Amino acid sequence: MSADIETYLFPTPLSDASALPLRVQIRERVLAAIGSGLLKPDDRLPTMRALAVHLRVDLNTVQRAYAELERLGAIRTLRARGSFVSDTPPHPDGVLKAAEARALAASTIARSQAAGLDPEAVVIAMRDLLGLPPTPSEPESGSAKG
C-alpha cells in the first residue's frame, strides 16, 4: 500500500452534516476498505496523528475510531509499531450485529427524514438495490420516489 494511504482511504472529506458522528464515519470507511479488499490482512493503517491531520479532525476522534475497530477485531495495535489490519476478520456476534443493524436502520430513518425523504421510499429503494421482490404494498422496482 502506498505511503499516502490516507488519501486512498479518505479521498473525500468526512461530512459534518451527516447524522453519523465523525468517529463512526472513520470506522465505517476503514471497515469498507477491509471488506472491499483495498486493505488486506497485515496492511498498516495510517498513524492516528497522520489521519487526524489528513481529515482535519481532533486526534481523540481518530483514537476512538481505532479503539472501536480494535474492539471489533478488525485491526490490532502493536505498541510502538502501529495499527494493522487483523489476519482474521471479526466473528460476528449475533446480538451485537442485530443491535448494530437496528442502530443503522434508526440512523438511516433519521437521515432520510432530515433530507426530506420518506423513509418508506428508502426501504423500497434498498429492497430494489438488494434485488428483493417488492412487498404487496410496494410499487414495482425502480419507482421509488423521494
Image (cartoon, grey):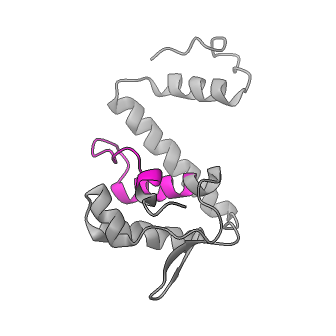
Residue 56, quarter of picture: bottom left
Which residue is depicted at the point 37% across and 71% down?
48
Asked if residue 67 lies in the magenta stretch, the reply is no
Could you tell me residue 68's position as x and y percent? Answer: 48, 69
Magenta range: 7-32
64 lies above or below 26: below
Which residue is depicted at the point 38% across and 60% down?
23
Which residue is depicted at the point 49% across and 14% down?
145
Which residue is depicted at the point 58% across and 11% down?
143
Task: Report how many numbered discs are placed on residues in the image.
Answer: 0
Could you tell me residue 108's position as x and y percent? Answer: 46, 39
Asked if residue 26 lies in the magenta stretch, the reply is yes
Could you say which is closer to the camera, residue 36 or residue 143? Answer: 36
137 lies above or below 62: above
> Looking at the figure, which quarter contains the C terminus?
top left
Q: Residue furthest bottom?
A: 79
Could you tell me residue 123's position as x and y percent? Answer: 56, 28
137 lies above or below 57: above
> Looking at the figure, which quarter contains the N terminus?
bottom right
Left or right: residue 58 compared with residue 10: left
Q: Residue furthest front?
A: 2
